[in-house]
Every structure is written in structure tokens, then in C-alpha cells.
Image (tube, rainbow, N blue to C red):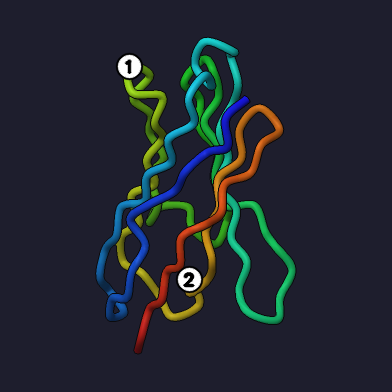
């Protein structure tokens, strides 16, 4: 399995939007789900969202209604559209697929 690669992080003001991408070659052909996690400084990593092989999605309560996960199977890529960002969304966001973790991409939201 190839390590997933995340991109799209950055710095935005509260209320802004970012779209994260995670490319994980083989996750489609291996019928793996894809999950996003985040870890803020000094805090434990927490699960954010997941998309399953059947297309079903799930979200943590803290992001439900603001974040949308989707996938492009032709590109083995999953997206996390993050709208109405809040300072508490500041964290390193990582994706996980087929048991493999990416390096992460930093999201910083200023008030």
C-alpha cells in the first residue's frame, strides 16, 4: 500500500473555507474506506469524517453541517470541503486508508 498524501491546508479567517485532498493510490481497487482525522496542538487526535465504499458518509458532531466529504474514484482521491471554519478547527488534518496514514496538512483558522 502507498502512503496517502494530503494537500490543501492553509490559513484562513473564521468563516472561510478550505478544501483538503487526500490521494491514496489503490484505495478504490482495494475497497477501502477513507477517513479524515485531526489533531490540535496539545490534544488527542480525533476522527472527523469518513466515506465508505458504498458512498455513505459520516461526520463528527463538531463538523456536521459544515464539512462535506466526497471522493473521485477515478483519481483515488477523497476531498474534505470545509466551510464556515472556526478557530477550534485549527489542527493538523490527516487521512487514513487501508491502514495507512498520510503525513498531514495544517489548517489554521484565525478569529
Question: In percent of the image, x 33 and y 56: which residue is there?
Answer: 8
Residue positioned 26% across, 63% down in the render: 17
Q: Do the residues labelled 2 and 1 touch (CB within 8 Å)?
A: no
Residue 103 image offset from top left, x and y in percent: 56, 54
Residue placed under numbered mark 2 in the picture: 89
Mark 2: give few (<14), some (14-19) or many (20+) Cα within 10 Å: many
Q: Residue 12: percent from the left, percent from the top? A: 28, 76
- Report helix, strand or loop for mark 2: helix
* 38 is higher (above) or lower (below) than 24: below
Q: What quarter of the picture does the N terminus occupy?
A: top right
Instruction: Assign the C terminus to one quadrant of the image.
Output: bottom left
**Between 6 and 70, which is closer to the camera in this rendering?**
6
Callout 1: few (<14), some (14-19), or many (20+) C-alpha neighbours within 10 Å? few
Say left or right for 84 vs 4: left
Between 39 and 54, the residue placed more toward the observer is 39
Q: Residue most toward the right? A: 44
Q: In which quarter of the image is residue 110?
A: bottom left
Pick the residue in front: 101 or 72: 101
Q: Is mark 1 on a helix, strand or loop?
A: helix
Horizontal arrangement in the rendering, residue 25 relative to residue 42 (left or right): left
The vertical placement of 47 against 91, above or below, is above
Q: Distance between the residues labelled 2 and 1?
A: 29 Å
Tag nearer the camera, 2 or 1? 1
Residue 26, numbered label: none
State the image quarter where residue 21 is shown: top left
Q: x and y percent of residue 2 in the render?
A: 57, 30
**Counting residues from the N terminus, which is met first, the one under dot 2 or under dot 1?**
1
Q: Write down the residue under mark 1.
A: 74
Amino acid at each position: 500500500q502507498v502512503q496517502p498524501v494530503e494537500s490543501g491546508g492553509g490559513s484562513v479567517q473564521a468563516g472561510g473555507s478550505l478544501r483538503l485532498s487526500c490521494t491514496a493510490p489503490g484505495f478504490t481497487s482495494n475497497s477501502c474506506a477513507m477517513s479524515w482525522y485531526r489533531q490540535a496542538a496539545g490534544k488527542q487526535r480525533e476522527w472527523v469524517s469518513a466515506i465508505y465504499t458504498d458512498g455513505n458518509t459520516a461526520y463528527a458532531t463538531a463538523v456536521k453541517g459544515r464539512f462535506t466529504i466526497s471522493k473521485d474514484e477515478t483519481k483515488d482521491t477523497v476531498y474534505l470541503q470545509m466551510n464556515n471554519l472556526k478557530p477550534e478547527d485549527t489542527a493538523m488534518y490527516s487521512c487514513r486508508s487501508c491502514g495507512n496514514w498520510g503525513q498531514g496538512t495544517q489548517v489554521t483558522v484565525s478569529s
